[in-house]
Image (cartoon, helix red, strand yellow):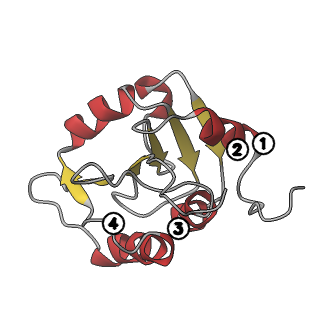
Amino acid sequence: MLIGVDPVISPELLDTLFRMGHGDEITLADAFFPGDSCNSRVIRADGIRVPALLDGILALMNLDSYVPHPAVMMSPASGDTLDPEVEKSYRAVIDKYWPATPPIEKIERFAFYERTKKAFAVVMTGETVKYGNIILKKGVIPLGKRM
């Protein structure tokens, strides 16, 4: 166990976050997401919900401040609806660590899959809410921020 690292962060996830460079993306996928079909680097976080993982991850890395939308979620399919509480819960964690982050972008489902194929890794979570996926783009450490 490491001091200051949330227990939801597995050794494999910690190693992945360390190896990611600025501009690399990581997808936190819900339990139903086709992770293995979209990326060869899949990390299991079964039983862990996305807000808990966001809290553990964003304590260790910042989001890219040089892009318009460093956090991206999937938009609903035609005729489907989103539960606004899902994004609100994710945004609350983002704001806890990086409150200047722009609004979360929404992209079409198949565009989300394509973006995930280019991501550094996919974390398969225990999240069961509809449209519970989010992509995070890693930033550079801000000036004056202690490592």
Residue 83, image quadrant = bottom left
| Label 2 element class | helix
Residues packed near mark 3 inside 10 Å, few (<14), some (14 to 19) or many (20 plus): many
Marked residue nearer the N-terminal end (2 or 4): 2
Q: Are marks 2 and 1 in contact (CB under 8 Å)?
A: yes
Q: Are marks 1 and 3 in contact (CB under 8 Å)?
A: no
- Identify the amino acid type marked 1: Pro
- Residue at 57%, 31% (x, y): give it: 42
Relative side of 63 to 144, left or right: left
Residues packed near mark 1 inside 10 Å, few (<14), some (14 to 19) or many (20 plus): few
Q: Are marks 3 and 4 in contact (CB under 8 Å)?
A: no
| Label 4 element class | loop
Disc 1 designates what residue?
A: 11
Counting every numbered tag in the picture gives: 4
Q: CA distance from mark 1 to mark 4?
A: 27 Å
Marked residue nearer the N-terminal end (1 or 3): 1
- Report the residue that reaches farthest toward the right: 1
For the N terminus, give its image quadrant: bottom right
Q: CA distance from mark 3 to mark 4?
A: 16 Å
Disc 2 designates what residue?
A: 14
- Residue at 49%, 77% (x, y): give it: 96
Residues packed near mark 2 inside 10 Å, few (<14), some (14 to 19) or many (20 plus): some
Q: Position of residue 61 (x, y in %)?
A: 56, 54
Mark whose residue sits in front, 2 or 4:
4
For the C terminus, give its image quadrant: bottom right
Q: CA distance from mark 2 to mark 4?
A: 23 Å
